[in-house]
Amino acid sequence: MWPTVSSDGVAAGEDQSLERPFGHDIDPRKLFAWAGVTASWPNRTEPGGTRGLDDYLTRDFSHNIGAEIMGRNKFGPQRGPWRDDEWRGWWGDEPPFHMPVFVLTHHKRASITLSDTTFHFVDGDPATVLAQAREAAQGMDVRLGGGVTTVRAFLDADLVDTLHVAVSPVTFGSGLRLWNSPEQLLDRFHLEVVPSPSGVAHHLFWRK
Amino acid sequence: MWPTVSSDGVAAGEDQSLERPFGHDIDPRKLFAWAGVTASWPNRTEPGGTRGLDDYLTRDFSHNIGAEIMGRNKFGPQRGPWRDDEWRGWWGDEPPFHMPVFVLTHHKRASITLSDTTFHFVDGDPATVLAQAREAAQGMDVRLGGGVTTVRAFLDADLVDTLHVAVSPVTFGSGLRLWNSPEQLLDRFHLEVVPSPSGVAHHLFWRK
C-alpha cells in the first residue's frame, strides 16, 4: 500500500473484495494519482513523469528497505484459514517488493517465493514480527507496508520510528481510518506537513 | 558541494583558499546548516538529527548515483599545472564519494584511488566528460557535484536533466552566482519551489 489517506483520514473501505481491493467506495486511482504521475512510480509503463517533490517521496519509498511487513488484507481479500493456496498476492509472478515480506495472519501457511520476493506468513505480536523482519533486513530498514490496521497496530505498540503519510485532497466519509487527526500522534512524534503542488500534503513524522 | 545557494544566488566566494574553501566571505556552515541538522547528513558524528523534508532531500543526494563530475575548484584551491601531487582533495583517506569522480582540469594528472573513490583528471568539453562519466556510472545516474562554474557550464551545454538547489535564507551580496534568478531556467525546465520549515526553499527543476 502506498502511504496515502484521504483528507478525512480514510485509507481503505471496509468491504474489500477481489474486484475492489480497497473496498467498493474507494477508488485507489484517486488516492494514488499524486504518485502515479511521477517518474519514479514503479508501475509506470511509458517514459516521462514529473520530477518534483512527489517524485522524491515516491522513490524514497524503497530507499534502504530490506524487508516489508504487511497485513493479510494487503496480501489478498480472503479471510480465515487459507483454503486456496493458489492465491499468491495481487502482484503476479514478479511482485514489486524484491525482498522478504512478512504477511501477518493467524493461519498457518508455508512461505512462497516469486521471483526475488519471498512471502512469509507469520503470527505474532508486532514486536516479535518486527524482530523477525529486522533480522531478514540485514541491517537495512523495515518498511511497514500497510494496510491501515497494521500501521495502527504498530503505532499502538510504539514500534514506529518514522512515518510518511500523503494526505490526498479527497474525502471518503467512511472507511478504515488511519487517524481522526494527525494531531493524535504529536505526543510521540515530530511532524512536518509539506504541501505539494499536486495538492497532496505530505505528513512526515519522526519519533521525539 | 551540497547544492545550496544564498537567496541572492551566490554559491561561493571568488577568493577560494586552503583555509576558506568557499572564499573568505562565505561561511559554508551557514549555507549547509539545513543539511547538517538532518539524520542523513554524511558527516554526522552523533546519532539523532531531523527526519523531515530536508532529510529526504539530503539522503536523496546519493540515490542511484554511479559517478560524479566536479570542477577543479571543488577538488582543491590550486590553480594552473599540478605542482604538488601530494594534494589529494579536501576529504582525507576516506572521501565520501564511494564512486568514480571526474575532476575537470586543463592540466594532466594521473588518476588516484583513495579507499573506494577514484579521482580521474579530465580535460574536455562537457559532453565528452559526461560521456566518460556515464560509462563509469554503469547505468546509474551521473551527479554534477559542483562548484557553481561547473554547474553553469553543463547548464549552458544543455546537459542537465534534473537539478536540486536549496536556496538558503542568507544573502552574500557578492561571489560566484549560480543565477541572477531561477526564472532564467524556466524556458527549459519545470520548476517546483518547496519551502521547508527550516527556512530553505528547495528548488526542484526537471527538463521540459
Image (cartoon, coloured by chain):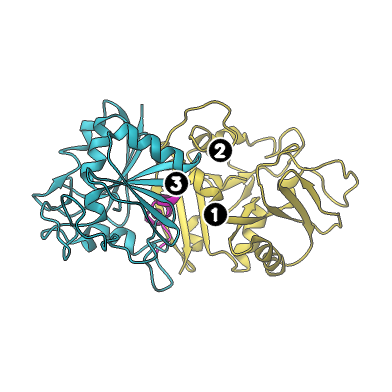
Chain colours: A cyan, B yellow
Residue type highlighted by circle 1: Asn
Q: Position of residue A33 (x, y in %)?
A: 27, 61
Please tell me how crowded label 2 is: few (under 14), some (14-19), or many (20+) other residues with Cα within 10 Å: many
**Quarter occupied by residue B46:** top right
Q: Work out whether residue B93 or residue B121 is closer to the camera in this orientation and state it.
A: B93
Q: Chain of mark 3?
A: A
Image position of A186 with respect to B139: above or below: above
At x 30%, y 59%, the residue is A34
Q: Is residue A44 above or below residue B24?
A: below
Question: Looking at the image, is mark 1 or mark 3 nearer the viewer?
Answer: 3
User: Does B35 appear in magenta?
Assistant: no
Residue B155 in the image: x percent, y percent?
Answer: 59, 63
Question: Which residue, as the protein is rendered here, is positioned at the far left?
Answer: A174
* Same chain? Circles 1 and 2: yes
In the rendered structure, the residue with mark 2 lies on which chain?
B
What number is the disc on residue B31?
A: 2
Residue under numbered circle 3: A65
Tell me which numbered mark, 1 or 2, is placed earlier along the sequence: 2
**Drawn side of residue A55 relative to residue B86, left or right:** left
In the image, which residues are magenta? A50-62
Horizontal arrangement in the rendering, residue B109 relative to residue A1 (left or right): right
Q: CA distance from mark 3 to mark 2?
A: 30 Å
Identify residue type, mark 3.
Ile
